[in-house]
Image: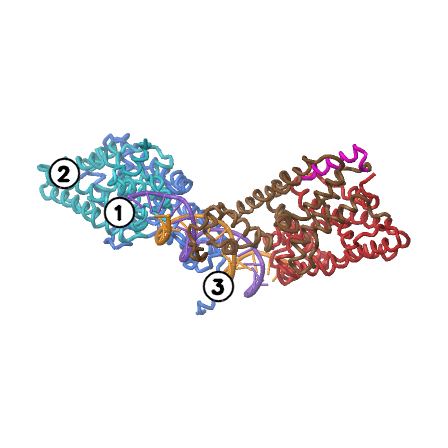
Chain colours: A brown, B red, C blue, D cyan, E orange, F purple
Amino acid sequence: MIAPEKIRKRHRRPNARPGEILEAALDLFSERGFAAARLEDIASRAGLSKASIYLYYKDKNRLLNAIVEAMAVTNVLSVAAMADSHQGPMMPLLRGILQHLGQRLAQGRLPDLIKLIISESRAHPDLGRLYLDRVVNRALPLFRKLIERGVASGEFRPVDADLAARCLVGPMLLTAVWKSVFEPIGAEPLDSEALARQHADILANGLLA
Amino acid sequence: MIAPEKIRKRHRRPNARPGEILEAALDLFSERGFAAARLEDIASRAGLSKASIYLYYKDKNRLLNAIVEAMAVTNVLSVAAMADSHQGPMMPLLRGILQHLGQRLAQGRLPDLIKLIISESRAHPDLGRLYLDRVVNRALPLFRKLIERGVASGEFRPVDADLAARCLVGPMLLTAVWKSVFEPIGAEPLDSEALARQHADILANGLLA
Amino acid sequence: MIAPEKIRKRHRRPNARPGEILEAALDLFSERGFAAARLEDIASRAGLSKASIYLYYKDKNRLLNAIVEAMAVTNVLSVAAMADSHQGPMMPLLRGILQHLGQRLAQGRLPDLIKLIISESRAHPDLGRLYLDRVVNRALPLFRKLIERGVASGEFRPVDADLAARCLVGPMLLTAVWKSVFEPIGAEPLDSEALARQHADILANGLLA
Amino acid sequence: MIAPEKIRKRHRRPNARPGEILEAALDLFSERGFAAARLEDIASRAGLSKASIYLYYKDKNRLLNAIVEAMAVTNVLSVAAMADSHQGPMMPLLRGILQHLGQRLAQGRLPDLIKLIISESRAHPDLGRLYLDRVVNRALPLFRKLIERGVASGEFRPVDADLAARCLVGPMLLTAVWKSVFEPIGAEPLDSEALARQHADILANGLLA
DNA sequence: CATGAATGAGGTTTCATTCAT
DNA sequence: AATGAATGAAACCTCATTCAT
């Protein structure tokens, strides 16, 4: 029952610092853009001084990279785990994956991360390629293989698996963009889980009656 | 005996200047991001001096707005025109629209424009809302109505038209992002027209055999 | 009879600017040391704004290099010219050279330049080697050859010409240091021309009666 | 069973710490210049932490002063001792003094100390005046008096004793600068004892045959 | 219409110094 | 006695913007 404001500004939870900084940085980078975000604002949102950031990250660019390194892998891993442990027809698995992504898009920082990648990859190619290697080029082949499996087993019609994988991902990307770009400027919120369900439905059965 | 290119530089297509500046600005803004793009680089790519940009645009922000104002509307208009002049079942129309978008994504500056919007809307909400009003909030309802029509006529299964419209758009957005973000940093090119076709196929018939 | 303050801050004597900046920079660099000298102070002493310095010199280091490049060569050249055009015994020439150096040390910026070189060469090895190549390694051999000639002709006793050359230069260096280091903090002024004369006298005849 | 070097680190020659810090500081100050030298580097070279320096010296400036205070006096004292205990003609004494200085310049930190004084006296006038009072204004009069004695006894020709004293010192200064400034950036080493001998020779007999 | 020159404002980064342990 | 962590202050450098020609 210690009064929390008694906790010192200095030496406070030293192990939590890096993560707090990353959170604040992702906030500011996705709000203002990397170049326009001020280290000072990041610092004050993370509850420390501008100079202290440099104790944890060598410079602004490293901070950017650290965000991606810290956050990028998780989502692919969880999807891969779902796929690995799956038996039986593909469609229920795809439905499950979409539902899972719908949830992550609804709750966490994934939309902001995706927006950040889109915004900064050109100007920071290393960053972009990191994401390409660790996420995109893992996730797309994973989806592609699931679809190929479905086609091979006769569950799916013979589609181009790579293109179909992108059709699968597209609406998820749209959701991420909607939540990170348009909702903050006043667009009406999007129910990402409902969209994931509807998308799974169309994906399975098509529009035609 | 004046060197002819001297004449050209000064008196050349005087009305083309603004457009050239916008092209150069879109180049630089999508390469570096708005904040990191230097007016001087834009100027030199447009073939004039930094100070001269101010003869055409009051400041850097106006330049950004001008890009969106100049380029945003076109695509919606063409899609709307296709919809207006259409008779008969919906699916062929949707297929045509997707094919049309696939082409525009393959050729023009549309991917860069979309990337720019995604990147800068948060920091420039006016810009974002402009795009939301003029493009997003025109295009999505348009698609929604087409789908509603299909549902009403019994051509389509009873789907949530708004969500379905987003499922329709998602892969097109993914294509734009791929072309403006990942291809420039080394990802393998994406055939946007093939993807549009595959997408139309899945949209119509679903994956299931 | 034009009021001088009517002269515009902008666009004034554009060709004189680089030199004015170098003068001001040498002032501040030798007063405070390179690292401690503030660009802003240099700018204000040169009569322009901090940012304008960057129109002429890429950064602080280039400014430092430019000083040495601009000022270093002159003195060696004038000494070399005296040596080239000389006939007859060596001692009068050496006397003339010392007298010449005594004058330059009394009037110009040479002491400050030398102090700058001494102070900054370690931290800026390129700078030091530039001076070593362009000045030291030209001047010392030049003196050495004059002494060797005197020894060969029998005018001088058989001395080690290289060491003797350094004995010749030593008091001039001391003068430079005295004027740039000790006079500014209150030491009594040194008559560099008298010292040059006395030095020439001792050099010729020695102390012994 | 405590690792012995642990004991050492903590309890090792507790009184040696200040001196070790001064050595490290002189290293860094003469390598980088006072302003550019980082306390952290000094600390790590002295084998302790940045904050610990403050246990021994109040701030960076005191550290600088301490160097001069600790090291400056020694050399004058030893020279004065030589002079006091001397009998007979002056020239052998001068020769001995030069030889002695030649040795100190070859072995110890004297060149770096002199370079430091030259570099920092302007920006730290107290430091400069300290050196002026304790060293320069003791050493020069000392030499002057020796020369005056020689002149009075008829051993030396009638020279200006003050200027001659500076001629005596000049080559020693040159040696110090050479060793602290030019050798570290690649100039060929100078044999300070040989130079001292040659200098004594010229000083005694002059160049002329 | 066009631009070279100039600058004010602002951001990143560094570092001496302090504090709590 | 010793130090890891934290920060305020300051300096370099950049760049959108303006001015005079």
Determine the secondary structure under disc 2. Answer: helix
Q: Quadrant of the N terminus of chain A?
A: bottom left
Q: How far across and how far down the image is residue D24, in percent?
A: 32, 41
The subunit letter for the residue under badge 3 reads: C
Q: Amino acid at mark 2?
A: Met
Q: Nearer the viewer, mark 3 or mark 2?
A: 2
Answer few, some or many: residues within 10 Å of disc 1's Cα (few below 14, many 20 plus, some between 14 and 19): some
Answer few, some or many: residues within 10 Å of disc 2's Cα (few below 14, many 20 plus, some between 14 and 19): some
Q: Amino acid at mark 1?
A: Ala
Q: Nearer the viewer, mark 1 or mark 2?
A: 1
> Mark 2 sits on what residue?
D82
In the picture, measured across the screen, residue B165 lies left or right of residue D182, that is right
Q: Quadrant of residue D104?
A: top left
> Mark 3 sits on what residue?
C9
Q: Amino acid at mark 3?
A: Lys
Residues marked 3 and 2 touching at CB (< 8 Å): no
Nearest the eye: C11 or A112 = A112
Determine the secondary structure under disc 3. Answer: loop
Are callouts 3 and 2 both on one chain? no
Are callouts 1 and 2 both on one chain? yes
Residues marked 1 and 2 touching at CB (< 8 Å): no
Q: Which residues are magenta?
A: A136-156
Q: Residue furthest right?
A: B88
Q: How far across and how far down the image is residue D174, in percent?
A: 28, 40
Q: In the figure, D162 relative to D7: above or below?
A: below
Nearest the eye: B4 or A63 = A63
Q: How far across and how far down the image is residue A133, in percent?
A: 63, 38
Q: How far across and how far down the image is residue D117, in percent?
A: 29, 46
> Mark 1 sits on what residue?
D66
What kind of secondary structure does the magenta stretch mostly adopt?
A: helix
